[in-house]
Amino acid sequence: MIRRVPRAAWLGCLAAAGIVVVLGLVLPVGATFADDELLRLDQLDPSLSPPRPTASCGAPLANLDAAAESAGAGPFYEQARGRACQAAAERRVTGVVAGAGVLGMVGLLGLAGPRARERLANRPRRPARAPAGA
């Protein structure tokens, strides 16, 4: 016999999905961009010493258009940083949406599942048909 999972567990799953969304979109995202093509151009001028190619980009939602803001403005380092922050923000948002979607669907299916089973079990039965050849 299958044990029913308490309703609170499914509601907890939905709450976890909400927490994943909030934390994933608020916690700062970091990026490394040592292998960016723009930083190779800085090596042509030996007098320039590029800063460390890591950055703390901040909240993911604020960085979804970071590459557009830094395009064509400032040194190569800022452009490379903007592109890396945007890529890291896109990865974070995609992961958060996917993870929260899975948790949310599990919670919703868990809440709807017992009701659907009860409706199926309590539906009126059709009378049995007589065989065609009889």
Image: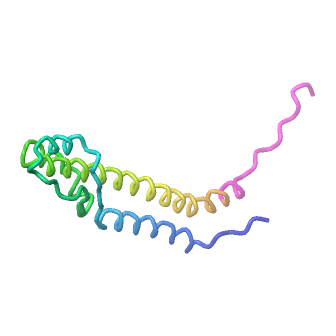
User: Looking at the image, what colour scheme do you see?
Assistant: rainbow
User: Which part of the image, by quadrant, shows the N terminus?
Assistant: bottom right
Residue 17 lies, in percent from the top left, at 44, 64
Q: Residue at x 16, y 54 (%)?
A: 50
Q: Residue 44: image x %, image y %?
A: 13, 40
Q: Is residue 63 above or below residue 68?
A: below
Front position in the image: 88 or 41:
41
Which residue is at the far right? 134
Quadrant of the image containing the C terminus? top right
Please state if 69 lies on the left or on the right of 12 as rendered.
left
Residue 20 picture location, percent across and down = 41, 65
Decide which of 103, 65 is in the foreground and name it: 65
**Span shown in magenta:** 119-134
Q: Residue at x 62, y 73 (%)?
A: 6
Q: Is residue 95 magenta?
A: no
Q: Foreground residue, 58 or 7?
A: 58
Q: Residue furthest front?
A: 46
In the image, is 114 to the left or to the right of 33?
Answer: right
Q: Is residue 84 left or right of residue 8?
A: left
Residue 4: give x, y in percent of width and height.
Answer: 68, 69
Residue, far top: 133
Relative placement, left or right, of 5 versus 10 is: right
Q: Is residue 55 above or below residue 76?
A: below
> Is 122 one of the magenta-colored residues?
yes
| Residue under the image location 24 percent in, 53 percent down | 85
